[in-house]
Amino acid sequence: MRSACGWIAGLAVLLLGIAWAAPSQATELPARGQIRTKDIVMLEKRVPLPPGEWQVVSSGFGRVADEDPGPYGAIGGVLLIRRGNSPREFLLIHTNALPVRDGWGAAPECASEKALVRSTGETHNLHNGCSFVMATRSGWLAGAHLPALADEAAARATLPPWALVAGFRVSDRRDVLDIRYGVVPDGFPAAGWFGDYDHLSAPQKAIADGLGDWAQRTRAVGVATLRAPAGQVPPLTAPPVHAAAGEENTGEEISATRLALYKLATYRLPASMVTLGLSWALSANFLTAVEVTIWQGLTHSLVFVANELAWEWPRTNTPMPFVQGAPRDNRQPVAAPSAGKIATFAVDGKFVPLPGEGWIVLAAGSADGITETILAKTEGTTLAGLTIARTNQAPRADILGTSGECSRTDIYFTVIRYDTPVDGYCAYGKQVVPATQGAADDPLWARAMERLQTDGVAIPPSLIVAGTRARTRENVMDVRYYFAPDPTLSSPEQDDPVAALQAWADLIQDSQEQGVRGRPPSLYARAPWPWKAEAVNAAITDQAVAPLLALAAAKAIDDTSLQQQRAKAEAALLARERQRWSLWTRSAYKVATYRAASYVDTTAVSWVVTGSAAQGFALATIGGYIRPIIAYINELGWANSGVGKASAPLVPVDFPDIGRDFH
């Protein structure tokens, strides 16, 4: 039942209003000389800063060297110095200009033998994270041609002759953030730092360890910066300059191999007891039962670990250096298209994209930590469209799977772009018949309908729905767009309107992914009405190409890179990412492959030991009913244990519709 504060929430939403998105351009970097405290806005990301005043000294664009993250691999960076400090301190911050699709590699320093301290996690679900501490000289740093040091003269004049650098890089399938903090500790000669960790003195080790712990803890802030609304991003703590911070290193998530062995250990004991009991009952011989149990314990362990690693083996964490691009000049960026511009609706720190202008809030409420908002767009006394947005009010402790609609086969279309324990995006299309009577089962829709009726707005007999769900590990934005069918088009059962709706759902994906992270849509995002097929197709092309043209105009990428990236971006439009299985389905297949292999293994081992095929099949068949229950309980226990990674059960959450599906 919705809380009594729903009207208050609705009023707050009304006060927030609906505004045109006004994001910073992806070609804008902080101006040189700018002084910032607390945070700095870089390429549409609000990056927190350590305490104090920090001044921008140099900035510039660059590219990825050696590896290729796909379209939009342009990197922007800034160099900042702390004002009025001794010893001298500086920050190097790099992030991507535009989202990519295939993730980013780790910082090369995380794999360097010259690092005094380093920590690198396994790559899972296109998420990377690593941290390091190493000594460096300013000449080498300037010679590394980092994008942030584009103004080489200013950088050389600002940077100290040498420094300890504590840095980290975090990334997901879309974005990357690389922060490096440099400091010159008092009381130690430079030469004493340029060796391995074992040659450091005890006080030096304390400083290196303190910086390493700070970099490791700060990585969590970096992840939140990329993936959470601003209100959920904690501040950066002060780096330990003269001594260790006194806080424990958070460490890395447990490796896939180690976690598989831990899972095996907890699964094998109850499973072996079941095998012993069944074998004893079937053979009537305790020693034979023990022998079967021992041999199955060995072979089943191999099968279990092999199955676990086959499903969970991480992708190679390949280093990805950032280097300077062409020098910048004063070219003007490409103007954003005006037709079909996109509006946003702010709620719970997130931005819900809306097609066109003229939307009004009909009703808002909250229940179970979810804010629900219903908006309408009218044309005179006719309802042109509805939007129902559901967003979480606070970071979630569980994993919200894909919408149940995205797994259906009896509606216009469904697509899962990706669905992992840490993120997901899916979309679907269908037709509904709005409930105009007996809507009390959904009080929010009842209130919205009353408002429409009071205003004399007619509700069409059916509405076409484009539903989306975008989520990160902690946040979710479930939005359903209801459109009145266009009378000039053929019936919705035919292909053209369905294709137009699916194209529109593809167009809105980027804005949804940005919105759930607390960022407004790209300056080049548009969302015309879905039935305007030519405008939708043009907007899809502009969304892919216009940001690249803007980067080239600002000299963030050269002409060669422009042509290469443009070709990849246009190819990606024809071959969009698509994940075949949802997280639920994948888990089921994972269990199925293990159960099939273990059934064969159980039959073979029992047959060899007892000499009876009948006993072998009987043991495998009976165990096939009992062991999946044990395995399921074991899997749930590890998912909720918090060992190796944050405790996060996968929970199904679906929301009511405003009416019944049209058939």
Image: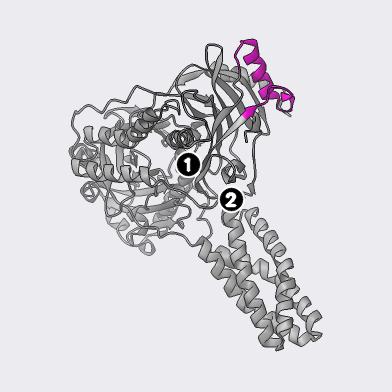
Q: Can see residue 392?
A: no
Q: Quadrant of the N terminus?
A: top right
Foreground pick, 434 / 357: 434
Q: Residue at x 57, y 74 (%)?
A: 302
Residue extending furthest toward the bottom:
611
Is residue 356 inside the magenta stretch?
Answer: no
Which amino acid, by three-letter code, is at mark 2? Ala
Label count reads 2
Q: Amino acid at mark 1?
A: Val
At x 37% / y 50%, what residue is drawn?
104
- Element under label 1? helix
Residue 125 image point, x, y percent: 48, 52
Up the image or down, 650 lies above or below 605; here it is above
Relative to 223, is 34 on the left or the right?
Answer: left
Q: Which residues are magenta?
A: 433-458
The spot of residue 503 in percent (x, y) is 43, 36
In the image, residue 52 lies at what x, y percent? 40, 32
